[in-house]
């Protein structure tokens, strides 16, 4: 049987050789093809082309087997008691906490690790507990995920000011001089929080980690949203010192879902004031005395019972990633992303116009493996992204369309102005469905197509997507392709159209 990457090469003649010639460093990642065959064979067995690693990475089968063994071999009780099964669970959770910090090369003297349900929960812990006061500042880039944007509701409730730093299309990066101007607006002696994604989940841009120290030197506490970054890039907390970091583990290694962390520097953690208390977060509480004393450190932020049956799987996932090699994963993903971008931008309609409008940097030095774009027809009109997702699905291609919970980046990329948005929201002051919103600004399009690569991606995946993309060459934006008339058509049959 041919290897998947060879099959990809055979499908688009000579392309694998051409790809290797253009990206010779890819050869150093070939062990990941073996990893895919060993750990992710379900992809090829089921004919799935998985291109949504920014949505969620995939777990290797050995991770699941190892965790199953752990669950079957151990008796775990609810932690924080002194009985033997409780102690066993506590020990596992605590060793996993240490492992998380080791993975990110953070020092326990500098950082605390708080287990959360996901990155959003970690971000909410910061937002609801940050000591915003009237006149304080919350500064964030335009391309934040909604779970960061939502912090503005907390800062407004306390009379602080929210300010967005624009990202500039088409590369979707921040102008450094502009950033300096915004950073200079920190309130002297006040509480100033600056938040940005280490990697944008919209454009794949990796913003400089150098911003952390720069912002801190201007008086900002820095909240780094690392959710979309850490699955394919190494975050070194020995080198970079953000005050708060948010992570979801399923985005790194697929399993477990439902576990994330807030990693916080001790002084930054002490700055947070929890707005409530819960089981597990206090040392003592009294009904009659109407008092409570918060526990010290991470415990004060971990409400109720932790997911102690799943948290040990985090250590397994981290070991899995470390074994695969973060540098190797990053190298592979960037080679594939670069090839994908170049080939997409090569696709042209008969009149010479480009099929693809890319949102994000073309060069590899400022990006990760998330590639976002729209397809345009020969007149430059955007093809409906929902139609693209539907048609991709018929080929068992999993990609994502829309604005990916990142409305600011979407608004910048698509050139939707504040006035247009205010007018749309104004038309429906009592609420609006997504469909109504779409219709309101429809002539611009409200979203994009996102393809993202990760640990198990290979050349074949990318070639399959390129074949699919090529099927839109010379297709008018309004037309539904012949393929649409036959929804039951098998994915394998539909592979031959429009390939050039
Ligand atoms: C950059 C970024 N931040 C935050 C989140 C929220 O992650 P979760 O849904 O796991 O809480 C995501 C999810 O896509 C993301 O990509």
Image: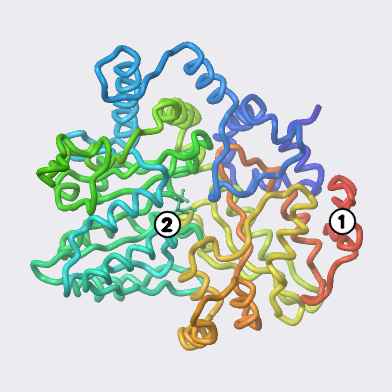
Please, what secondary structure does the residue beneath circle 1 have?
loop
Q: CA distance from mark 2 to mark 1?
A: 38 Å
Q: With respect to residue 35, does 70 lie above or below?
A: above
| Residue 357 locus on image (x, y percent) | 63, 71
Q: Residues within 10 Å of mark 2 (few under 14, many from 20)?
A: many
Q: Nearer the viewer, residue 359 or 427?
A: 427
In the image, is 130 to the left or to the right of 335?
Answer: left
Q: Residue at x 63, y 27 (%)?
A: 34
Crowding at dot 1, Cα within 10 Å, few <14 / some 14-19 / many 20+, comes out as few
- Asked if 348 appears above or below 1 in the picture, the reply is below
The residue that label 2 is drawn on is: 206
Q: Quadrant of residue 262?
A: top left
- Which residue is located at x 22 percent, y 56 percent? 213
Identified at 80% across, 52% down, the residue is 394
Q: Quadrant of residue 115?
A: top left
Residue 99 at what x, y percent from top left? 33, 28
Quadrant occupied by the N terminus: top right
Q: Locate the C terminus and report the quarter of the image it occupies.
A: bottom right
Colour treatment of the image: rainbow
Q: Is residue 296 visible to us here?
A: no
Which mark, by number, is residue 421?
A: none
Q: Is mark 1 within 8 Å of ligand 1?
A: no
In the picture provided, is 344 more to the left or to the right than 238?
Answer: right
Above or below residue 277? Residue 432 is below
Closest to the observer, 237 or 145: 145
Q: Residue furthest front?
A: 288
Q: Point out residue 256 in the picture as x, y percentages from the top left corner.
A: 49, 34
Q: Which residue is mark 1?
A: 487
């Amino acid at each position: 049987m041919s290897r998947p990457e060879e099959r990809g090469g055979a499908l688009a003649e000579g392309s694998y050789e051409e790809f290797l010639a253009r990206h010779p460093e890819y050869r150093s990642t070939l062990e990941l093809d073996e990893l895919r065959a060993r750990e992710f064979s379900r992809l090829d067995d089921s004919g799935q082309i998985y291109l949504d690693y920014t949505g969620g990475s995939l777990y290797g089968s050995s991770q699941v087997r190892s965790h199953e063994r752990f669950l079957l071999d151990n008796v775990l009780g609810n932690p924080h008691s002194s009985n033997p099964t409780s102690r066993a669970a506590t020990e596992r959770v605590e060793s996993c906490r240490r492992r998380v910090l080791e993975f990110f090369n953070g020092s326990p003297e500098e950082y605390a690790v708080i287990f959360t349900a996901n990155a959003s929960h970690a971000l909410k812990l910061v937002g609801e507990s940050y000591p915003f006061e009237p006149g304080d500042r919350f500064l964030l880039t335009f391309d934040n995920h909604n779970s960061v944007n939502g912090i503005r509701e907390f800062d407004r409730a306390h009379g602080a000011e929210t300010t967005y730093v624009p990202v500039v299309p088409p590369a979707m990066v921040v102008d450094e001089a502009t950033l300096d101007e915004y950073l200079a607006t920190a309130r002297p002696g006040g509480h100033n929080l600056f938040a940005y994604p280490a990697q944008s989940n919209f454009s794949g841009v990796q913003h400089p980690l150098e911003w952390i120290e720069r912002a801190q030197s201007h008086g900002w506490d820095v909240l780094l949203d690392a959710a979309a970054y850490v699955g394919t890039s190494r975050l070194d907390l020995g080198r970079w010192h953000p005050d708060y970091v948010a992570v979801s583990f399923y985005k790194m290694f697929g399993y477990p879902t439902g576990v994330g962390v807030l990693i916080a520097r001790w002084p930054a953690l002490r700055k947070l004031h929890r707005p409530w208390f819960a089981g597990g977060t206090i040392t003592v509480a009294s009904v009659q005395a109407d008092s409570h004393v918060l526990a010290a450190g991470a415990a004060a932020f971990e409400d109720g019972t932790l997911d102690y049956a799943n948290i040990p799987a985090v250590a397994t996932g981290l070991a899995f990633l470390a074994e695969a090699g973060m540098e190797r994963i990053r190298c592979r993903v960037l080679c594939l992303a670069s090839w994908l971008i170049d080939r997409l931008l090569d696709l042209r309609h008969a009149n010479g116009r480009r099929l693809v409008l890319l949102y994000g940097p073309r060069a590899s030095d400022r990006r990760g493996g998330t590639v976002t774009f729209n397809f345009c027809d020969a007149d430059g009109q955007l093809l409906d992204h929902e139609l693209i997702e539907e048609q991709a699905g018929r080929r068992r291609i999993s990609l994502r369309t829309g604005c990916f919970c990142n409305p600011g980046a979407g608004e910048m990329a698509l050139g939707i102005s504040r006035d247009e948005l205010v007018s749309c929201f104004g038309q429906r002051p009592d609420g609006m469905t997504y469909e109504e919103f779409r219709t309101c600004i429809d002539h611009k399009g409200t979203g994009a197509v996102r393809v993202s690569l990760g640990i198990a991606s290979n050349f074949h995946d990318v070639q399959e997507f390129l074949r699919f993309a090529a099927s839109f060459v010379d297709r008018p934006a309004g037309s539904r392709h012949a393929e649409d008339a036959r929804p039951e058509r098998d994915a394998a049959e539909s592979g031959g159209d429009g390939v050039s």
